[in-house]
Image (cartoon, rainbow, N blue to C red):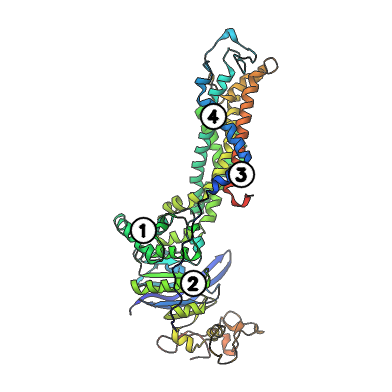
Amino acid sequence: METPLQTETSQPKPITSVRPFWYKLKQNQMTWVGLGILGVIVLCSLIAPILTPYNPTQVDISSKFLAPSLHHWFGTDEVGRDILTRILYGARISLGVGITVIIMASVIGILIGTISGYFGGVIDVTIMRIMDMVMAFPTLILAMALAAALGPSLQNAMLAIAIVKIPVYVRLARGESLVLREKLFVKSAQSFGINPWRIIGKHIVPNSVSPVIIQATLDVGDAILMIATLGFLGLGAQPPTPEWGAMISIGWKYLLDYWWYPTFPGLLLFLSAGSLNLIGDGIRDILDPKAGR
Amino acid sequence: MSTLIDFHSVDKSFYKGKESVKAVIGANLTVKKGSVVGLVGESGSGKSTLGKMLIGLEMPSEGSIQYAGAPLWKNKKFIRPRPGEIQSVFQDPQSSLDPRMRVKEIILEPLFALGTRERKEKGSRERLTSLMKRVGLKAEHLDRYPHEFSGGQRQRIAIARALITDPSFIVLDEPTSALDVSVQAQVLNLLKELKNERNLTYLFISHNMSVIRYMCDVIAVMYKGRIVESGPARKLFESPRHPYTKILLSSLPSIFEKKGPALSFAPPAEVDSGEEACGFFERCPFRMEACLKAPAFESITEEHGVACHLEG
C-alpha cells in the first residue's frame, strides 16, 4: 500500500533581475514630462539665491510695476519686488506645503482606515460616520471654515487642508483592509496568536499602501491649489511671505494694467499641479497591474 | 497512544440574518497522539470548519473540544494551549503567504506570539537555515519574496513556517490540492518524514481519497456536516459500511480489477424527507422507510463507527 512515491528536490527557479518599476516608468512618457517640469521647478527654487540677485521680501518703491525685461524677467510687483524671485522662493512654500499636507493626511488616513477596516464593528461604524460627516461638506468650504476658525496663518491653513483630506484616505485604506482581513495570510497570522496591532502593521498597512500612494500623488496638486486658494482668500500665508496663492490674490486686481503680476505665479501653479497629476497617473499605471498596458 | 484532541458533539451554525446554515452537526472525533487523522468529504461538508476550530478561526456553536485534557474554547474565547503548539498549513500557498514579506520574515512570523527570549532562541540563524534545508529549500531563498517561488516551494515555505515553533500538532487543510500531481507526492512525502522525525500529530483534511489513503491512520468521512463513518484507514478501505463511503471508494480509479459494478448516487428522492431524515437520504441508493429518522452514530468495533440504519 505504501510504495514510496517519487522524491526529488525541486529545482529553484532562477530569478530574473528585471526591475518592473523602472521598466514601466521608462515606457511612460507623460510621467517623464511631469517629472521633468517638476524637477526644474524644484531645482530652481532650491538654487534660487544663485539664480537671482534679488531678495523676495526687499521693498524697492522706485522700481514698482516694471514690465518684464532682461533685469526683471517676470516684472516687478506693487512695491518693486522681483516676481521671478518671489515665485522661486514661493515654490518652496507652495510645493513644500502641498507635499507636507498630503503626507500628513495620508499617514493619518491610512492608520485610521486600516484600524477601522480590520477591527470592524462599533469602531468601524463610529469612525466611518465621523468621516461621512467631514465628507458631507464641500472640501474647500470646510477648509475655509476651519482655517478661518483657527485663525489666518499658513500652519492653520495646512492643518485645515489635512483634516478635510483625511476621509478620502480613510475610505481607501478601509476598503483595502476589508479585503485583506479575509485573506489567508492574515487568517493564518491570527491563528498563530499574533497581536492584532502587529497584524495591522505588518500585513494590512503594507498591502494597502499602493492605492494610497497613487491617491496621494494625485492629491498633491490639489493641495497646492487649495493652499493657494486659501492664500488668495487671505486665510493662508500672510504678507510678505512669497506664496503663489497670496501673490495671485494681490495681483489679480492689477491684471488689466500690469498683466505679468498674477499671470506668472498662476502659470507656475498650473505647471506644477499639472505635472504632479501626470506623475500621479504614471504611478497609478505602474502600481496597478490591471491598468497596465 | 493517549488522546490528544477530543471533539465532543460539536455543532457549528453560520447565521446570516434569520437564516442559518449548519456546517457541523454533532461531530465526535478523537485524535490520538502521534497519529494522522484524515477528514474526507465533498466541499461544504464542514471538514475545513472543523479544522478551523482547532486554530481559533471558528468558534463551535455547541459542544466542547479538548486539547490534551484542557478545553480549547471557553466562554466564546479561544484558549491557546502553548503559543505555537498547534500550527496549520493551508490549501493555497499563493494566498497564505504575504506577498510583501520576505521568506525569512514569513517563516519567523509565528514566533511573534512567543516571549522575547524564546523567540530569539527559536529564530536563530542556524535553526532557520537547517529548517530551510529540511523542507527542501536553500538558505539563500530566505531573502526572496513568495512570488519568486513555484507552488510546491511555497507550500514548503508554509510548512517551514508551521514547524518553526516546534508544534506537536498541525492542521493540514488540503495542503496539496492546489499542487500538480508530481509535486503533491513530494510534499506528501516531506510531511510524512517530518511527522516521524518530530513525532507530530496531523489532522489531514482532504477530498482526495488516494492522498488520504497514503497519509492517514484513521479516517473520518463527513457528509453535510455530519461524520457518517470513522475508523482505521485499512478497515475503512477494505470494508466501508456507510453507503456514502462505499460510493466514494468505488469512484477511485484502481489498477486492480473492479469487484462489481460501480456504486453511484441515487436520483433525488421523490418523498419529501423533512428535517428528521438521514442527511444522505436524498442521494442514498439504499434508502428505506427507516431512513426518514436520522440514524445514530454507532460503533461496530472499538474504533470503527458508522451512522446508518443498514448497520447495527
Q: Is residue B213 above or below residue B300?
A: above
Alpha carbon separation for disc pair 3 and 1? 43 Å
Residue A144 in sight here: no
- Viewed as shown, does residue B49 lie left or right of B78? right
**Residue B184 marker:** 2
Asked if badge 3 and badge 4 are on a common chain, one would say: yes
Location of mark 1 (residue): B111
The reply to whether dot 3 and dot 4 touch (C-beta < 8 Å) is no
Secondary element type, mark 3 = helix
Label 1 is found on which chain of the structure? B
Secondary element type, mark 1 = helix
Label 3 is found on which chain of the structure? A
Asked if badge 1 and badge 2 are on a common chain, one would say: yes
Secondary element type, mark 4 = helix
Alpha carbon separation for disc pair 3 and 4? 24 Å
Q: In the depicted view, which residue is nearer to us: B216 or B66?
A: B216
Location of mark 3 (residue): A27
**Residue A42 marker:** 4
Q: Amino acid at mark 2?
A: Gln
Q: In the depicted view, which residue is nearer to us: A269 or B281?
A: A269
